[in-house]
Image: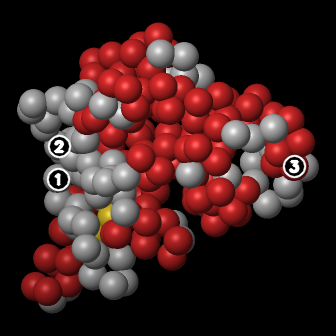
Amino acid sequence: MSLGLFKMWGMNGNLEEKGLVACEDGRIRPAWAAESELMRNYYDHEWGRPILTESEAFERLVLEGFQAGLSWAIVLRKRDAFRLAFKDFDVDAVAAFSESDIERCAENPDIIRNRAKIRAAVHNARCVQELREDGGLLALLASFAPEHWEQPVSSATAHTVSAESHQMAATLKKKGFKFVGPTTCFALMEATGLINNRVVGASDLL
């Protein structure tokens, strides 16, 4: 075995132990983010990037809620259809949904047709409206960013909940939100850059 091949074998062996994959494009990603072009692009360009608007925060909150019990890949494949069905996640537009709007979504084969989650999205939009009096959804979510966070050294050791995600879930539930458990809140936190949960050694955002 040549020295170059030996080094490559050693690197890949170490990556495998960390739950990482050396992809053909030269980037290193966790296995879940290497399974398709859609997931690779999401990991490279979106996962962990801070959000700047209320509608972006509301979209993440809703989609993370729809993910419960499913894989993120399923939600991501349907995201464009979700955006169309939920008016680009304009909070006021969704808050104004009528029963016929809810039924329209429930009969839409391009999204996840879970009536409870659809109703929760409409209900949560109304909760977001009420938050505006106290600084808004973005400010509330940002208030749970920890002062210190250690990146995981492997996929196996990466957290899926934290003290802060439990606190966020409890606060959101107290304010009336639905489908906002600590695991869902943690997924939102890592996806929106409130914590950096990239495995040490993985490629950064582009």
Q: Position of residue 70 (x, y in %)?
A: 64, 42
Report crowding for label 3: few under 14, some 14 to 19, many 20 or more residues within 10 A (C-alpha): few
Q: Quadrant of the C terminus?
A: bottom left
State whether residue 34 appears in this view.
no
Residue 104 badge: 3
Between residue 8 and residue 150, name the one nearer to us: 150
The first of marks 2 and 3 along the sequence is: 3
What is the distance, in whole Å, between disc 2 and disc 3 at their CAs?
A: 42 Å
What is the distance, in whole Å, between disc 3 and disc 1 at their CAs?
A: 44 Å
Q: Is residue 192 above or below residue 22?
A: above
Disc 3 and disc 1 in contact, CB within 8 angstroms: no
Q: Position of residue 96 (x, y in %)?
A: 70, 40
The first of marks 3 and 1 along the sequence is: 3
Pointer 2 residue: 151
Q: Residue at x 83, y 45 (%)?
A: 101
Residue 102 badge: none
Q: Quadrant of the N terminus?
A: bottom left
> What is the secondary structure assignment of the residue under circle 3?
helix
Q: Position of residue 151 (x, y in %)?
A: 17, 43
Q: Is residue 130 above or below residue 173?
A: below
Q: Residue at x 33, y 53 (%)?
A: 51
State whether residue 126 appears in this view.
yes
The amino acid beneath tag 2 is: Gln
Disc 2 and disc 3 in contact, CB within 8 angstroms: no
Pointer 1 residue: 200
Q: Residue at x 81, y 38 (%)?
A: 98
The amino acid beneath tag 3 is: Arg
Disc 2 and disc 1 in contact, CB within 8 angstroms: yes
User: Quadrant location of residue 111?
Assistant: bottom right
Left or right, 178 with respect to 171, comes to right
Q: Residue at x 64, y 48 (%)?
A: 93
Between residue 73 and residue 15, name the one nearer to us: 73
